[in-house]
Every structure is written in C-alpha cells, then in structure tokens.
C-alpha cells in the first residue's frame, strides 16, 4: 500500500470519527424570554401537541376520502355541464326532476368546494377553534340551502325557469 493511500484512509477515519462524535453530542437548548407575556400567541401560528419526535398520526382509512372521493368530485363537476345545458334547453317548470337534480348537484358541488377550502386552509391543528367549528357551520349551511332550494323548486318557479328568465332578461 502506498503512503498516500494510508494517509487518505487515516484522514477518512478521522473525519468519520469526528462526525460520529458530533452526532452523539446533545445539542444545547436555549430559551427565549419575553418581557411581558409568558406565552405569546401569533394568530394563525402553529400549535403543536407533544414534541417533534412524536410519530405522525394517520387518519383511519375511509372510502369517502381518496380516490373514490376525487372520482365523485370529478363526476359531479362534469355532470353539471349537461345539467346546466339541459336547463337552458328545457325552459319552463315542466321538469321538476331536472330542477331537483340540478339543485342538489349545485349545492353538493359548492359544499365540496368549501369543504376543500376548510381542509386546506383552516386545519384544526393550526386553528383549534375555527378548524373544528367551521365544518359544522358549513354542514348546517348546506342543509339550510338544500331546504331553500327544495322550497324554491316546489313552491316557486324552480331553477330551470329561473335560469330561462335570467338568460332572456
């Protein structure tokens, strides 16, 4: 073995030993002292439970989330195009079934969109109060809108007639 190779191996062993010693040493912990408050809360800031070394909890598997949920969203969105076109073609309240399907489809499409907004931007881990309350507000609002659409379709002119009147106005 050449002397250069022996020197290189010794250098590599020394580097590996240095890194191994540094990895074992505990890091120094510093604390930040605030003058006026003991716990400052930043609106929208992170709220973590436990430590960073705790394992991530995964939600239980569900058929309503994932690929089935995504496929339903796409099918609903694509189905609104012919339903809206059918509402333009069949002006008049002679089609209560079309009014009902269009009303439920529009409300469900809006509900899924707002629910995605809540899941993406107002997660309960970051917003503990709003993140848990707003999905229930959305559900109650969706039920109220469904009742309103039902009342509008049964006791008033219906969605297809409304679309026809707005289109010709």
Image (cartoon, rainbow, N blue to C red):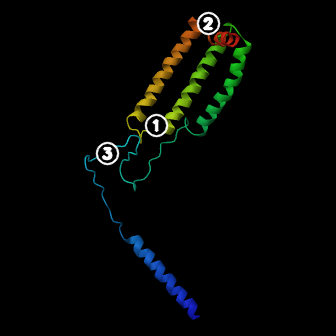
Tell me residue 101's x, y (percent).
Answer: 63, 18
Give neighbour class at mark 2: few <14, some 14-19, many 20+ (Cα, 10 Å).
some
Q: Mark 3, mark 2: which one is toward the viewer?
A: 3
Residue that mark 1 sits on: 122
Tell me residue 50's x, y (percent).
Answer: 35, 50
| Measured Cα–Cα span from mark 3 to mark 2 | 55 Å
SS category of the residue bearing label 2:
loop
Which quarter of the image is occupied by the N terminus?
Answer: bottom right
Residue that mark 3 sits on: 40
Residue at the extreme front of the image, as rendered: 35
Residue 157 - label: 2
Figure check: 52 above or below 46: below
Give whichever of 68, 104 is nearer the camera. Answer: 104
Evaluate if marks 1 and 2 touch, with contact meaning CB atoms under 8 Å apart: no
Q: Which badge, 1 or 2, comes first in the chain's sequence? A: 1
Residue shown at the point (49%, 38%) measured from the top left: 121
Residue shown at the point (30%, 58%) measured from the top left: 31
Residue at the extreme right of the image, as rendered: 89
Figure check: 91 above or below 62: above
Residue 42 located left or right of residue 117: left
């Amino acid at each position: 073995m050449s002397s250069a190779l022996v020197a290189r191996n010794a250098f590599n062993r020394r580097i590996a030993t240095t890194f191994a010693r540094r990895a074992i040493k505990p890091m120094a912990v510093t604390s930040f002292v605030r003058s006026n408050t003991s716990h400052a809360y930043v609106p929208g800031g992170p709220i973590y439970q436990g430590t960073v070394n705790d394992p991530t909890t995964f939600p239980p598997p569900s058929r309503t989330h994932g690929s089935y949920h995504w496929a339903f969203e796409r099918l609903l969105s694509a189905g609104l195009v012919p339903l809206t076109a059918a509402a333009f073609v069949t002006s008049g309240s002679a089609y209560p079934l079309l009014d009902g399907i269009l009303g439920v489809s529009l409300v469900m499409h809006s509900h899924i969109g707002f629910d995605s907004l809540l899941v993406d931007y107002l997660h309960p881990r970051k917003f503990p109060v709003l993140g848990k309350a707003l999905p229930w507000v959305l559900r109650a609002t969706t039920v109220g809108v469904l009742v309103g659409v039902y009342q509008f379709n049964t006791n008033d002119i219906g969605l297809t007639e409304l679309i026809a009147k707005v289109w010709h106005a």
